[in-house]
Amino acid sequence: MFPVSKFKILNMPDFQETNWYVITGPPCSGKTTLINRLSNLGYTINPDISRAFIISESKNGFNVRRLRKKENEFQKKILSLMLDNALYLDKTEIIFHDYFLPDNIAFLKLSNLEIPVEFAKSAKLFSFKLVFICSPLKFESDDVRIETEHDQLQLFELIKGVYSSLGCKIIILPPTSIDERLNMVKAFL
């Protein structure tokens, strides 16, 4: 069940103005590396909540496949955690998000799941200064992700589609070095 009620989500205004940026992309696109570099430069970041949740649960004996066996329920939990987090962040502060609410829709679409109304509404709660979408890099498996290289490419397209449909200004970061990507992001600030 959602700690933040559906009623509260459904009755919030769309696109609350923020000074937030999103750095997103499919698994193995370098987004977390880029976010960490921005953090090292003193920027405020909001880390990937789904990765943190999976790591936390794995310490309690759950593995990622078990957690994501019911993808719809997993995504509902991630949505709830993201909303709990987002509703208390300062909208006037420059914050870089490592994945954000609209990304949940891309992951549901990847699994061919229906998009519940609270997901659609939550994707429209906040405006963003810019959305940086990292192009896929060489795919590598790890203990947290279940996606495949094929999924990586599909998610790249799905993420672009979701943010485009929301009217967000999108910058595609090419598959270049971290320093080049960092310079591209800083050029837009």
Image: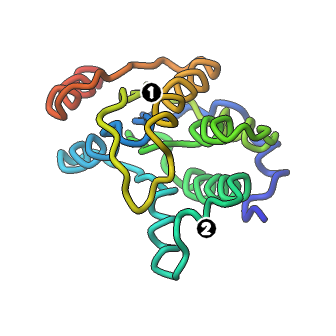
Alpha-carbon neighbours of circle 2 within 10 Å: few (<14), some, or many (≥20)?
A: few
Left or right placement of residue 1 versus residue 136 in this view: right
31 lies above or below 77 = above
Which structural element holds mark 1?
A: strand
Q: Nearer the viewer, residue 114 or 79?
A: 114
Residue underneath mark 1: 131
Give me the residue at 29% from left, 36% from top.
138
Residue underneath mark 2: 66
Residue 84: image location, x then y, percent: 61, 59
The mark found on residue 119 in the picture is: none
Of the 4 image quadrants, the one containing the C terminus is top left
Is the image coloured rainbow, by chain, by secondary structure, or in one colour? rainbow
Choose the circle earlier in sequence order: 1 or 2: 2
Residue 168: image location, x then y, percent: 54, 21
Residue 10: image location, x then y, percent: 81, 43
Residue 89: image location, x then y, percent: 50, 51
Give me the residue at 52% from left, 70% from top.
63
Give me the residue at 82% from left, 52% from top.
6
Give the farthest residue toward the left.
179
Give me the residue at 40% from left, 53% from top.
47
The nearer-to-camera label among 1 and 2 is: 2
Left or right placement of residue 18 versus residue 110 in this view: left
Query: Dots 1 and 2: beta carbons under 8 Å?
Result: no
Alpha-carbon neighbours of circle 1 within 10 Å: few (<14), some, or many (≥20)?
A: many
Q: Amino acid at mark 1?
A: Val
Left or right placement of residue 45 versus residue 108 in this view: left
